[in-house]
Image (cartoon, helix red, strand yellow):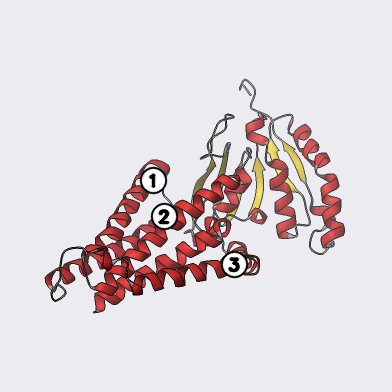
Amino acid sequence: MIFRILAGLIGLLFLNIGLGFMAFPDILATAFFVQPAHAQGLNAIRGDFGGLFLGMSFFCFLGAGTGRARWLVVPSVFIVLIIAGRLISLGLDGYSAAGAQSILLEIGMVLVLISAIAVLTRNPVAGEKDFEISEVLNARSLTIVALVALILAGLVFSQKKIGLTLARFIATDFMTSNVINDLPDGLHVALIGSGAPLPDPRRASPCTAVIAGKKLYIIDTGPSSMRKLELMRFKPEDIQAVLLTHFHSDHIGDLGELMLKRWSGGAMKTPLDVFGPTGVETVVSGFNTAYSLDSRYRVRHHGPETVPPGGAGGVARPFQFPPGTDE
């Protein structure tokens, strides 16, 4: 009975996640660090993610309710495949703390389900017969499906209100979390973007974060690097300075966004120092000019206490290469 209850609890977890993906694909995608692309991306998240989790919950409930081990094999196989995918990702894509935690949770669920299968196999239901369709299609299972459908319909029709509540909760979590505080004292490097000028759905353009003690420095700010930086739970307002190695577009494209978000997110009273070789004055001045209207709008809208006028933009800090060194 204990293992049947545990299997049912796992099914309840999958049910909640599946309903979330079906009703609020954009919010759940953010919580799972997934970025849907347009309507087709949301369609895939509702169908693939929502269908997967709802399907696993159904078989968990079926196994827990009937006491038949064979139904628990289905979610067990899916979870094992999910773990395999995560392990492959850790090897090929790099370490992820959230991914490692998910693996530990999923291993725990697999162990519970396998234990339940072993126990139920040793203690089969009295008079257990071969599979009959009535095991799946019966009054109880159809009632559960109808209840899930009603809950899903309620979530969809209340999508705006519930979605805003969830969005506030997730936004608060993003705003209050700080990955730097979780790091041990020392020197750390994080690759924010390692892509090339050619489009790549998996990589932002060049950007590297260096954490010295508890201070954050950024090297290059290629396109999409700010989005990646924030998804990795770094706070723009923690940035002490930026170093631009050179001025190709794929190394400077997000400098304006970085300066803006650092200023508006941290109520900075002084501009950001931007170090670079000769010519950095032109780059920084160009971004300052391009964002000057936006900066004035934000001061009027949010007030000088939230966005101090003197903190917008950046200050160029040019440096010279040693004589005889190619730039």
Q: Are the residues at dot 1 and dot 3 in contact (C-beta closer than 8 Å)?
A: no
Residue where numbered disc 1 is placed: 89
Contact, CB < 8 Å: mark 2 with mark 1? yes
Q: Position of residue 54 (x, y in %)?
A: 41, 62
Q: Is mark 1 on a helix, strand or loop?
A: helix
Residue 52 vertical placement versus 120 (above, below):
above
Q: Name the residue under label 2.
A: 99
Q: Where is residue 94 in the image (x, y as percent from the top left)?
A: 42, 45
Q: Where is residue 23 in the image (x, y as percent from the top left)?
A: 55, 62
Q: How far apart are marks 3 and 2 (CA)?
A: 22 Å
**Residue at image location 72% in from the left, 29% down from the top:** 278
Give the residue pinned by disc 3. Answer: 166
Q: Quadrant of the N terminus?
A: bottom left
- Residue situated in front as seen by the camera: 99 or 282: 99
Which quarter of the picture shows residue 199?
Answer: top right
Q: Which amino acid does label 1 sit on?
A: Ser
Judged by depth in the image, the label closer to the viewer, 1 or 3, is 3
> What amino acid type should be assigned to the residue bearing mark 3?
Leu
Q: Who is closer to the viewer here, 231 or 274?
A: 231
Name the foreground residue: 210 vs 256. Answer: 256
Identify the element where label 2 is drawn.
Answer: helix
Q: Name the residue type under label 2.
A: Gly
Q: Residue sitting at 82 percent across and 58 percent down?
A: 308
Instruction: Give the left or right position of residue 53, taking residue 21 as reference.
Output: left
The secondary element bearing badge 3 is classed as helix
Callout 3 crowding tier (Cα within 10 Å): few <14, some 14–19, many ≥20: some
